[in-house]
Image: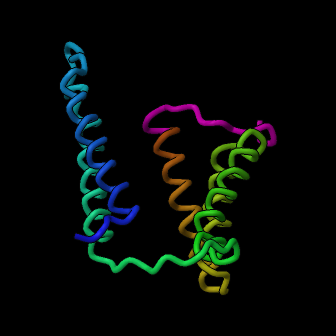
Amino acid sequence: MTRLNRDAVIAVLLLILCGVLFWQTFFIREVPFSQIGSEVWPRAVLILLAVLALIYLFTSLSEPRPENAPFCLKSWLKAYKNPLICFAMFFVFLLALPYLGMLLAGILFVFITQTLVGGASPRRVVTHAVVSILSVGGMWAIFTYALRVILPAGELFY
């Protein structure tokens, strides 16, 4: 029997966590006169998370494991360059949020992150701009006008 790799162990732990959390949804208090039960959205999210964890488990078991090589910082940075860029950009987004507001900081975050991770050819830059404006602007409009959620406006646009 072969040893499980780290990804398979994490996927099994995620599935166990999903099961425990799904079980806990049966103890959510029902709100009187509600259209749907209070447990519906948590269960929907947990089912989606469990499906993604199953996909993660199957792909981690089907892929061949790489040989154990000694740790090298340069190769580790190269392998995890995109996630590190995303985390760094999210940190910059959080710092810019009080000054630029949710709409402008969100559009800049999505645009710059896509450009850094996906490349910067003229066609891609236009695509990144359209995607960032439509996705962040659309979500901002839904939260602001449909759901009446007050999002941060930022100090520059008061």
Q: Residue 109, position in %: x, y? A: 65, 58
The picture quadrant where one finds residue 21 is top left
Judging from the image, the colouring scheme is rainbow
**Residue most extreme to the top:** 32
Image height of 10 relative to 125, above or below: above
Q: Quadrant of the C terminus?
A: top right
Quadrant where the N terminus sits is bottom left
Vertical side of 20 occupied by 6: above or below: below
Q: Front-most of 133 and 77?
A: 77
Q: Residue at x 33, y 69 (%)?
A: 60
**What x and y, as percent, mark residue 119?**
63, 81
The residues colored magenta run 145-158
Residue at left offset 68%, top offset 66%: 112
Question: From the viewer's perspective, is 111 left or right of 156?
Answer: left
Compared to residue 26, the image places residue 11 above or below, namely below
User: Image check: 31 left or right of 108?
Assistant: left
Residue 112 shown left or right of residue 54 in the figure:
right
Residue at far right of view: 156
Q: Which secondary structure is most common in the magenta stretch?
A: loop
User: How many numbered tags mark residues here?
Assistant: 0
The residue lying toward the viewer, choosing from 91 and 102, is 91
146 drawn magenta: yes
Residue 56 occupies quadrant: bottom left
Q: Kindly indicate the quadrant of the structure image that contains residue 121.
A: bottom right
Q: Residue 12: where, in percent of width, then height?
A: 29, 53
Q: Percent position (x, y) of residue 43?
A: 23, 38
Magenta-colored stretch includes residue 105:
no
Q: Which residue is more in the foreground, 31 or 131? A: 31
The residue positioned 49% from the left and 38% from the top of the image is: 145
Q: Please name the residue shown 45% across and 80% down the image.
A: 67
